[in-house]
Amino acid sequence: MCGIVGYIGTQQAYPIILKGLKRLEYRGYDSAGIAIYNGNDLGICKTKGKVADLQKKCEANIELEGSIGIGHTRWATHGEPNDVNSHPHYSNSGNLAIIHNGIIENYDSLKKELSNRGYTFQSDTDTEVLVNLIEDIKTKENVKLGKAVQIALNQTVGAYAIAVFDKTKPNEIVVARLGSPLAIGVGDNEYYIASDASPFIEYTKNAIYLEDGEMAVVRLGKEIKVRKIHDDSLVDPYVQELQLNLDQIEKAGFDHFMLKEIYEQPSAIKDTYRGRMLPDQGLIRMAGIDDNLERFLNAKRIVVVACGTSWHAGLVSEYIFEDLARIPVEVEYASEFRYRNPVINKDDIVIAISQSGETADTMAAIKLAKENGAFVFGVCNVVGSSISRETDAGAYTHAGPEIGVASTKAFTTQITVLSLIALKLGKAKGTISNSDFHMYLNELELIPYKIEKALESNEHIIKVAEVYKDAKNCLYLGRGFNFPVALEGALKLKEISYIHAEGYPAAEMKHGPIALIDEQMPVVVIATKKGHYEKVVSNIQEIKSRKGKIIAIVTEGDTAVREMADHMIEVPDTIEAFTPLLTTIPLQLLSYHIAVMLDKNVDQPRNLAKSVTVE
Ligand code: F6R
């Protein structure tokens, strides 16, 4: 978690860093800070709260004029969110300033050693320990900043993306990464440093992404030198040309990023299948699968590892893979998988799903699977992310940047990619007929238009949200392909409106949760006219006879549920396997509108961060 930004060049650093921090706020937003070298000394501004609070505090601070600086937006790990614990942190001499995303796990023992040598600490953070360790080494060993950083990092255990500079040598910033992302934007006689490319996209399209275990000295007027932290060997930096543009990371007239991203789903899904799905030719082309087709066809089992919403997409894929490709699937929380002693075989394919491509637990699960000889395939959204690089092969979702903390278009595009894979394997294995394959492809091509239709229920959903916005609890029920959608609907409501919600397979209700139902309990039931429709209708009757309030997500034209439900939200008809792509839309909108009515911070819900780079 945490977002870091740095600048060294000829422009004023403060506005660039401030704007960059606003773009990275999805990574953490409990405190923020900026340090600029003003030609004389370090101008410092830090505060508890959001980047907007930082801006208020920094305004009219002339000390923040200068063209080298660093900034940070924090998601607290060590030490509560307050002004003192905010980054940047300084060494005891006041010469070195650092920003850090990650955790130094052995900070306690390092702190004791440094304290014994007379160092004092203002904050409770691991980062202040690291900057003093660097200073200690620099002084004791009489080495340059880059060397001191390297020696210090070889003494640390943990994860980091850091940027450090020395006010007595204000023409360079030293950066390093292990387990947390770090990109360097290469401009014309200027460099940008950031957790991702969004802070510098309007200034340069050229970027170097450091790999884990690499560091660089970013010096004005010099080419960037990248080296391995552990053995000092030089690495040829690869300057990548970015495809991202500014429009993609702004709100485009929507009140919130979440709403914009909900509405982007039709185009995002088209971007996901474009060039891969060729219905006219009866083909699916995916390089990551084509290059490893034998391995996939011989797989005895697929193990999906993921967290949160991505885990829900994995659960949907379990139904899809088993149905279409007849491959057994297990779906694991990455955080549990990594600490079990899981049985993994060489014939297993592990699919890691992650929007950000930076989730620490998913990354650790991948490493464990690889150590055990499994082939790991990544489904990521962020191009060049750590997970996309760590996996043996993969497919990007191409959903475009997802800024709202609550995942929306990531979910539907992940399901799209996973459906394409299942269809491709099903066809190659002969577990689906050619005519069914064509029918699925044609239907998937129509899904974006059907989502557009589902989005037309927005005004109606606002009215439903109005009725239930003050509920204290909410149940979500679904069966088969739509059981994971019930889990996802409940997660969306919890995380942005802070209303307690639970998702259940509809038939499990009678094994416990039915006791919760009374006239106060809204129950969202996904009852599309597919699969277990009659069974779900029976579940609705059971809820009705206990006076629960029913919000039913139904197929267009449904009449049977109308008699029982308090509210109906219609979605277009589709093949059962693709119903999650439609039923999830009203659930996203319902959560969104309830959260807005409750005046919650939709894009940045409390205690959360977009990319969870700590375990
Ligand atoms: C919920 C949400 C989270 C993420 C989870 C995994 O709306 O966004 O549950 O899905 O933190 O993140 P990624 O997909 O980036 O690995």
Image (spheres, rainbow, N blue to C red):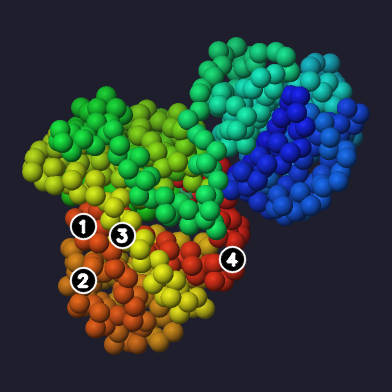
Q: CA distance from mark 3 to mark 4?
A: 27 Å
User: Disc 1 designates what residue?
Assistant: 574
User: Disc 2 designates what residue?
Assistant: 557
Q: Earlier in the sequence, mark 2 or mark 3?
A: 3
Task: Kindly report which numbered mark, 1 or 2, lies closer to the viewer in this rendering.
Answer: 2
**Disc 4 Cβ-to-ligand 1 distance below 8 Å:** no
Q: Is residue 594 left or right of residue 537?
A: right
Res. 79 in view: no
Q: Position of residue 265 (x, y in %)?
A: 38, 50
| Mark 2 secondary-structure assignment | loop
Q: Position of residue 570 (x, y in %)?
A: 29, 68
| Mark 4 secondary-structure assignment | loop
Q: Is residue 573 left or right of residue 598?
A: left
Q: Earlier in the sequence, mark 1 or mark 4?
A: 1
**What kind of residue is marked 2?**
Gly
Res. 194 in view: yes
Front position in the image: 534 or 123:
534
User: Disc 4 designates what residue?
Assistant: 600
User: Disc 3 designates what residue?
Assistant: 453
Q: Is residue 91 above or below residue 51?
A: above
Q: Earlier in the sequence, mark 2 or mark 4?
A: 2
CB-based contact (under 8 Å), mark 1 and mark 3:
no
Q: CA distance from mark 1 to mark 4?
A: 34 Å
Q: Is residue 97 left or right of residue 294?
A: right
**What kind of residue is marked 1?**
Thr
CB-based contact (under 8 Å), mark 3 and mark 4:
no
| Residue displayed at 54% across by 19% down | 239
Say few, some or many: other residues with alpha carbon within 10 Å of mark 1 (under 14 / 14 to 19 / 20 or more): many
Q: Earlier in the sequence, mark 1 or mark 3?
A: 3
Front position in the image: 214 or 549:
549
